[in-house]
Image (cartoon, rainbow, N blue to C red):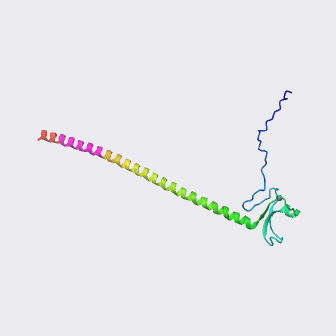
Amino acid sequence: MSGASSDVSGASSGGSSSLRRGGKIIGIPKRCWCGTEIVPLMSKSDHNPYRRYFRCAHAAAKKLMNDNHVFKWIDEVLINEVESLQFKIARHEEQLIEMAKTETLLAEKVQMTVEKEIFDQVEQVLIEAKASMKKMMVLGLVGCVVLGVIVGKVV
Ligand SMILES: [Zn+2]
């Protein structure tokens, strides 16, 4: 009884679960997963009289029941929409605060850099000015001496 290579490798998890389409619908749907347009209709049932809903036009035409084509009460869609908008607004506000923070930091950094550059330039100019002043003074002194010598010789 030699086991004829019973290859039991059931560990190959090949995610075979296909994407379930037409699951949760957030916002106002445009098309059903089947490709048919979504139409707004009004309920005539006793439970929800005059309540408006979105429905897959194909399913509505065929009067399908308990199917997985798009069906969504409009008031619920609107509530979802408002909720997701509130969430988005909150996130945008956070981002704005974050951006304002970085902008202030950046502005401070730029100002510091500019101030430092100006300071460096002014210092450079001052050093140059001092150097040329010294040169002028030396030249003037030499000139005076030379002039004095000449004048002294002449007189
Ligand atoms: Zn459909």
Q: From the image, give the main secondary structure of the stretch colored magenta.
A: helix
User: In the displayed image of the protein, which residue is found farthest to the right?
Assistant: 62
Residue 48 located within the stretch drawn in magenta: no
User: In the displayed image of the protein, which residue is found farthest to the front?
Assistant: 1
Residue at left 54%, top 56%? 99
Ligand 1 falls in quadrant: bottom right
In the figure, 50 relative to 27: above or below? below
* Left or right: 102 in relation to 52: left
Q: Position of residue 20 (x, y in %)?
A: 78, 52
Residue 131 located within the stretch drawn in magenta: yes
Residue at left 85%, top 64%? 60
Q: Closest to the observer: 62 or 141? A: 62
In the figure, 86 relative to 15: above or below? below
In which quadrant of the rendered image does the N terminus lie?
top right
Which stretch is magenta?
130-145
Residue at left 46%, top 51%? 109
User: In the displayed image of the protein, which residue is found farthest to the top?
Assistant: 2
